[in-house]
Amino acid sequence: MSKDEFYVGGTGLVITFKPKRSGLRAGILNIYEGKFVNGKWQPGRRMNGDQDHQGRHLRIPQGEYGIQRVKLYTYQ
């Protein structure tokens, strides 16, 4: 996993991302639902623009528990 990848788990979440460097913006390159099996990440379905609102935020709906792996990028 690289410095621009994160695991997010829970329910009822909407998360946006902001880079540490000022003047830049963060976008979502991809999000995968998945799970850990014997300590190893097993990716499931890849989320599309409907689920990440065209790369603006990660969402796990209220009442649905899940783990998602998100990879970010920065732009001006």
Image (spheres, rainbow, N blue to C red):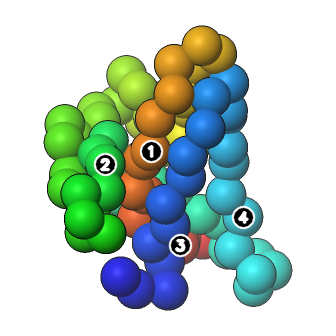
Secondary structure of residue under mark 2: strand
From mark 1 to mark 3, how far is it between C-alphas? 23 Å
Dot 1 alpha-carbon crowd within 10 angstroms: few under 14, some 14 to 19, many 20 or more: some
From mark 2 to mark 1, how far is it between C-alphas? 6 Å
Please name the residue shown 59% across and 63% down the image: 26
Specify which label sits upstream in the sequence, 4 or 3. Answer: 4
Please name the residue shown 68% across and 24% down the image: 12
Q: Are marks 2 and 1 in contact (CB under 8 Å)?
A: yes
Could you say which is closer to the camera, residue 60 or residue 71? 60
Please name the residue shown 67% across and 34% down the image: 14
Tell me which amino acid carries mark 4. Lys
Secondary structure of residue under mark 3: strand
- Residue 54 is situated, as x and y percent measured from the top left of the image, at 43, 36
- Circle number at residue 18: 4
> Is residue 27 rendered to the left or right of residue 17?
left
- Residue 76 is situated, as x and y percent measured from the top left of the image, at 60, 71
Specify which label sits upstream in the sequence, 2 or 4. Answer: 4
Q: Residue furthest front?
A: 38
Secondary structure of residue under mark 4: loop
